[in-house]
Image (tube, rainbow, N blue to C red):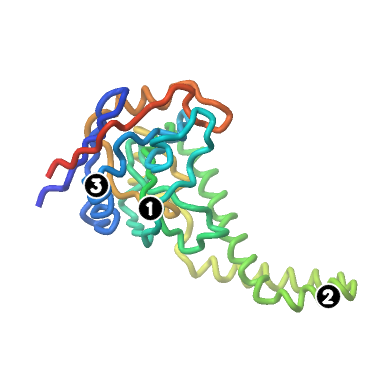
Amino acid sequence: MEETTVRLETTMGNITVKLYDETPRHRDNFIKLAKEGVYDNTLFHRVIKNFMIQAGDPESKTASDTASLGSGDVGYTLPAEFNAKFIHKKGALAAARKGDEVNPKKESSGCQFYIVTGQVFTESQLLDIEQQMRDSQLTGIFNALAQKRIKEIYKMRRAGDNDGLMALQEELEEQAREIVKKETPAEFTPEQVQAYTTVGGAPHLDGAYTVFGEVVEGMDVVDRIQKVKTNRKDRPEENIRILKAVVEE
């Protein structure tokens, strides 16, 4: 079966994306919303050059020029559908979502999406990003371990037991390092390195946001959109609208 494509007819030209069959919930949801006209007349409300262009907020259809956008939704989220072979290369179509602090399962917005523009990286830069990913992984595990001992930590703080706090910190850091050793290391595959050093993208997003498609026509339109002038909230100063989303089955 051929993958479904959706044509986004925008005020700056057409962008055609194909939807991956391996991410069926996101595929079916995107098709449903497109057919229902949810994306018609919505804005590209967040545009960051050399990173991505974001759209799909239903509230943007009738928003004033000064409205703050990005919090609109359709009343539900989608479970993450991470797939290691779908990465944030230039042209990737991915689901936006709320941050980890309120969304630990990394569930996707029911409607908002973005298209990656990104940048080309050197292998040295990718190594630096890998180290940042490992540091973030270690910090996340440490914080989770500390949360389980929070009553003990508060008790030591109230007692002014700095030696006890330092000993506990060292214990938790060692536990976190041991856990990280057993987990899949945060490192890029040869395929990721090839993509990010040639076509480019946003490698730091891999494994954190669901990629469910990619641009197959109209990347020149995406590039034009990413270069428009924006305000301090990254909203284009002149509205760029999706006039219609057409499912091509």
Q: Is residue 102 above or below residue 160?
A: above
Q: For mark 3, give the secondary structure.
A: helix
Tell me the number on the disc at residue 36.
Answer: 3
Q: Is residue 222 visible?
A: yes
In the image shown, does 151 or 10 lie closer to the viewer?
Answer: 10
Whichever of labels 1 and 2 marks the residue nearer the N terminus, that label is 1
Task: Answer whether labels 3 and 2 touch (C-beta < 8 Å).
Answer: no
Q: For mark 2, give the secondary structure.
A: helix
Where in the figure is residue 128, as x and y percent of width and height? Answer: 55, 43
Query: Mark 3 Cα within 10 Å, few/some/many (few <14, many 20+)?
Result: few
Figure label count: 3
Whichever of labels 3 and 2 marks the residue nearer the N terminus, that label is 3
Q: Amino acid at mark 3?
A: Glu
Q: Is residue 176 above or below residue 52?
A: below
Q: Is residue 4 above or below residue 118?
A: below
Residue at 41% x, 35% y is 62
Tell me the number on the disc at residue 156.
Answer: 2
Number of the front mark, 1 or 2: 1
In the picture, which quadrant includes the C terminus?
Answer: top left
Q: Is residue 11 above or below residue 146?
A: above
